Amino acid sequence: MPLLKIAKLGNPVLRQVAKPVDLNELADPESELQAFIDDMIETMYHEGGVGLAAPQVNQSIQIVVLEYSENKRYPGETSIPLTVLVNPVLSDYSKETKDGWESCLSLVDFRGLVPRSTTITLNAYDRHGGKIQKTVSGFEAVVLQHEIDHLQGFVFLDRMKDFTKLSYQEEFDKFWVKKEDNSFLE
Ligand code: NI
Protein backbone atom coordinates (compact mmCIF):
# COMPACT_ATOMS: atom_id res chain seq x y z
CA MET A 1 0.00 0.00 0.00
CA PRO A 2 1.42 3.35 -0.99
CA LEU A 3 2.20 6.03 1.54
CA LEU A 4 0.38 9.29 0.88
CA LYS A 5 2.03 12.69 0.60
CA ILE A 6 1.27 15.11 3.44
CA ALA A 7 -0.16 18.51 2.50
CA LYS A 8 1.58 21.28 4.42
CA LEU A 9 0.25 24.64 5.58
CA GLY A 10 -0.10 26.91 2.55
CA ASN A 11 -1.63 24.15 0.44
CA PRO A 12 -5.18 25.37 -0.30
CA VAL A 13 -6.60 21.86 0.24
CA LEU A 14 -6.13 22.40 3.99
CA ARG A 15 -8.40 25.46 3.86
CA GLN A 16 -11.30 23.91 1.95
CA VAL A 17 -14.47 22.48 3.46
CA ALA A 18 -14.20 18.75 2.70
CA LYS A 19 -17.02 16.98 0.83
CA PRO A 20 -19.15 14.31 2.54
CA VAL A 21 -18.42 10.72 1.53
CA ASP A 22 -21.01 8.83 -0.54
CA LEU A 23 -22.07 5.98 1.76
CA ASN A 24 -23.01 3.77 -1.22
CA GLU A 25 -19.44 3.96 -2.46
CA LEU A 26 -18.18 3.25 1.05
CA ALA A 27 -20.31 0.07 1.17
CA ASP A 28 -18.36 -1.47 -1.73
CA PRO A 29 -15.41 -3.36 -0.20
CA GLU A 30 -13.54 -3.13 -3.51
CA SER A 31 -13.97 0.64 -3.76
CA GLU A 32 -11.07 3.03 -4.10
CA LEU A 33 -12.38 4.61 -0.94
CA GLN A 34 -11.61 1.51 1.14
CA ALA A 35 -8.09 1.30 -0.33
CA PHE A 36 -7.65 5.01 0.41
CA ILE A 37 -8.65 4.46 4.07
CA ASP A 38 -6.01 1.70 4.33
CA ASP A 39 -3.44 4.08 2.85
CA MET A 40 -4.43 6.79 5.34
CA ILE A 41 -3.87 4.38 8.24
CA GLU A 42 -0.48 3.31 6.87
CA THR A 43 0.51 6.94 6.37
CA MET A 44 -0.56 7.89 9.91
CA TYR A 45 1.57 5.06 11.31
CA HIS A 46 4.52 5.96 9.09
CA GLU A 47 4.39 9.64 10.09
CA GLY A 48 3.97 8.85 13.78
CA GLY A 49 0.73 10.85 13.99
CA VAL A 50 -2.09 10.33 16.46
CA GLY A 51 -4.62 11.26 13.80
CA LEU A 52 -4.85 12.11 10.13
CA ALA A 53 -7.60 13.82 8.14
CA ALA A 54 -8.09 13.21 4.41
CA PRO A 55 -7.37 16.84 3.41
CA GLN A 56 -3.92 16.37 4.95
CA VAL A 57 -3.25 13.82 2.21
CA ASN A 58 -4.72 15.99 -0.53
CA GLN A 59 -8.24 14.51 -0.61
CA SER A 60 -10.95 17.01 0.27
CA ILE A 61 -13.37 14.41 1.65
CA GLN A 62 -14.72 13.82 5.15
CA ILE A 63 -12.61 10.96 6.49
CA VAL A 64 -10.49 10.93 9.63
CA VAL A 65 -8.35 8.17 11.13
CA LEU A 66 -6.92 8.15 14.64
CA GLU A 67 -5.11 5.85 17.00
CA TYR A 68 -3.06 6.42 20.08
CA SER A 69 -1.06 3.92 22.06
CA GLU A 70 2.38 4.89 23.27
CA ASN A 71 3.71 7.94 21.50
CA LYS A 72 6.71 9.75 22.86
CA ARG A 73 5.33 13.08 21.63
CA TYR A 74 2.30 12.55 23.88
CA PRO A 75 3.38 10.57 26.92
CA GLY A 76 0.95 9.40 29.53
CA GLU A 77 -2.31 9.90 27.62
CA THR A 78 -5.16 7.40 27.58
CA SER A 79 -5.10 4.95 24.64
CA ILE A 80 -7.42 5.38 21.65
CA PRO A 81 -8.09 2.26 19.55
CA LEU A 82 -7.71 2.50 15.76
CA THR A 83 -10.74 4.48 14.62
CA VAL A 84 -11.97 5.41 11.13
CA LEU A 85 -14.60 8.15 11.01
CA VAL A 86 -16.61 9.00 7.92
CA ASN A 87 -18.66 12.22 7.71
CA PRO A 88 -18.02 12.98 11.40
CA VAL A 89 -19.90 15.80 13.12
CA LEU A 90 -19.19 17.18 16.58
CA SER A 91 -21.78 18.85 18.77
CA ASP A 92 -22.46 19.71 22.42
CA TYR A 93 -19.05 21.31 22.89
CA SER A 94 -18.60 21.72 26.64
CA LYS A 95 -18.13 25.26 27.90
CA GLU A 96 -15.33 23.95 30.05
CA THR A 97 -12.07 23.96 28.12
CA LYS A 98 -8.56 22.78 28.81
CA ASP A 99 -5.31 23.99 27.26
CA GLY A 100 -3.04 21.45 25.62
CA TRP A 101 0.07 21.61 23.41
CA GLU A 102 -0.91 20.45 19.94
CA SER A 103 1.10 19.64 16.88
CA CYS A 104 0.13 18.72 13.35
CA LEU A 105 1.71 16.74 10.53
CA SER A 106 0.77 19.63 8.22
CA LEU A 107 2.58 22.16 10.41
CA VAL A 108 5.65 19.96 10.79
CA ASP A 109 7.75 21.48 13.54
CA PHE A 110 5.31 23.68 15.43
CA ARG A 111 3.70 23.23 18.82
CA GLY A 112 0.97 25.53 20.07
CA LEU A 113 -1.11 25.80 23.21
CA VAL A 114 -4.76 25.33 22.24
CA PRO A 115 -7.90 25.48 24.38
CA ARG A 116 -10.35 22.66 23.58
CA SER A 117 -13.68 21.59 25.02
CA THR A 118 -13.21 18.85 27.56
CA THR A 119 -16.33 16.94 26.43
CA ILE A 120 -18.04 16.67 23.03
CA THR A 121 -20.60 14.49 21.24
CA LEU A 122 -19.51 12.63 18.09
CA ASN A 123 -21.83 11.49 15.32
CA ALA A 124 -20.18 9.66 12.44
CA TYR A 125 -20.07 6.48 10.37
CA ASP A 126 -17.41 3.79 10.58
CA ARG A 127 -15.70 2.50 7.42
CA HIS A 128 -18.47 -0.05 6.90
CA GLY A 129 -21.22 2.55 7.16
CA GLY A 130 -22.20 1.66 10.73
CA LYS A 131 -23.45 4.57 12.80
CA ILE A 132 -21.34 5.89 15.65
CA GLN A 133 -22.73 8.16 18.32
CA LYS A 134 -20.90 8.77 21.56
CA THR A 135 -19.90 11.35 24.10
CA VAL A 136 -16.15 11.72 24.32
CA SER A 137 -13.85 13.38 26.85
CA GLY A 138 -10.16 13.57 27.65
CA PHE A 139 -7.41 13.13 25.08
CA GLU A 140 -9.72 11.52 22.51
CA ALA A 141 -11.97 14.61 22.61
CA VAL A 142 -8.98 16.82 21.85
CA VAL A 143 -7.78 14.64 18.95
CA LEU A 144 -11.30 14.57 17.49
CA GLN A 145 -11.64 18.36 17.65
CA HIS A 146 -8.24 18.79 15.99
CA GLU A 147 -8.89 16.25 13.21
CA ILE A 148 -12.48 17.21 12.45
CA ASP A 149 -11.38 20.85 12.29
CA HIS A 150 -9.25 19.79 9.29
CA LEU A 151 -12.46 18.79 7.48
CA GLN A 152 -13.79 22.33 7.91
CA GLY A 153 -10.58 23.98 6.69
CA PHE A 154 -9.21 24.87 10.12
CA VAL A 155 -5.82 24.15 11.63
CA PHE A 156 -4.88 24.41 15.30
CA LEU A 157 -3.40 27.88 14.81
CA ASP A 158 -6.94 29.15 14.18
CA ARG A 159 -7.99 27.96 17.65
CA MET A 160 -5.10 29.47 19.57
CA LYS A 161 -5.82 32.40 21.86
CA ASP A 162 -2.24 33.38 22.65
CA PHE A 163 0.46 33.29 19.98
CA THR A 164 3.17 33.75 22.58
CA LYS A 165 2.47 30.04 23.16
CA LEU A 166 3.53 29.02 19.66
CA SER A 167 6.88 27.26 19.55
CA TYR A 168 9.15 25.20 17.37
CA GLN A 169 9.44 21.62 18.61
CA GLU A 170 13.07 22.01 19.60
CA GLU A 171 12.33 25.10 21.71
CA PHE A 172 9.20 23.43 23.08
CA ASP A 173 11.35 20.57 24.35
CA LYS A 174 13.82 23.05 25.79
CA PHE A 175 11.56 25.66 27.37
CA TRP A 176 7.99 24.36 27.68
CA VAL A 177 7.96 20.68 28.55
CA LYS A 178 7.07 20.25 32.17
CA LYS A 179 7.46 16.71 33.35
CA GLU A 180 4.62 17.04 35.86
CA ASP A 181 2.22 18.20 33.15
CA ASN A 182 1.87 15.79 30.25
CA SER A 183 -0.99 17.59 28.58
CA PHE A 184 0.55 18.05 25.17
CA LEU A 185 -1.66 16.91 22.42
CA GLU A 186 -2.17 16.32 18.73
NI1 NI B 1 -3.43 18.23 12.21
Image (tube, rainbow, N blue to C red):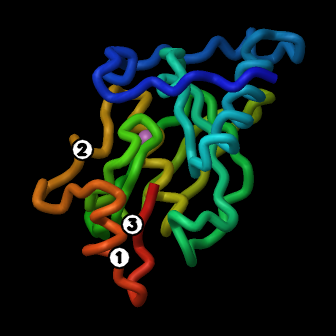
Q: Relative to residue 52, is residue 13 drawn left or right?
A: left
Mark 3 Cα shell of 10 Å, populated few (<14), some (14-19), many (≥20): some
Is the residue indicated by label 1 positioned so its CB lies within 8 Å of ligand 1? Answer: no
Comparing 8 with 118, the one in front is 8
Amino acid beneath label 2: Leu
Provide the residue designation for mark 1: 177
Mark 3 vs 1, N-terminal side: 3
Amino acid beneath label 3: Thr
Residue appearing at x 75%, y 21% in the figure: 2
Q: Would you say residue 98 is visible in this rendering?
A: yes
Residue appearing at x 58%, y 35% in the figure: 64
Q: Relative to residue 149, is residue 4 drawn left or right?
A: right
Residue appearing at x 73%, y 56% in the figure: 81
3D distance between C-alphas at marks 3 and 1: 21 Å
Q: Would you say residue 90 is visible in this rendering?
A: no
x, y percentage for residue 158?
Answer: 22, 41
3D distance between C-alphas at marks 2 and 1: 19 Å
Q: Count all numbered tags in the image, as a single digit.
A: 3
Q: Relative to residue 15, is residue 21 drawn left or right?
A: right
Q: Relative to residue 13, is residue 127 drawn left or right?
A: right
3D distance between C-alphas at marks 3 and 2: 18 Å
x, y percentage for residue 30?
Answer: 88, 12
Q: Nearer the viewer, mark 3 or mark 1?
A: 1
Provide the residue designation for mark 3: 118
Q: Nearer the viewer, mark 3 or mark 2?
A: 2
Kind of element beneath mark 3:
loop
Q: Which mark is residue 28?
A: none
Q: Which mark is residue 157?
A: 2
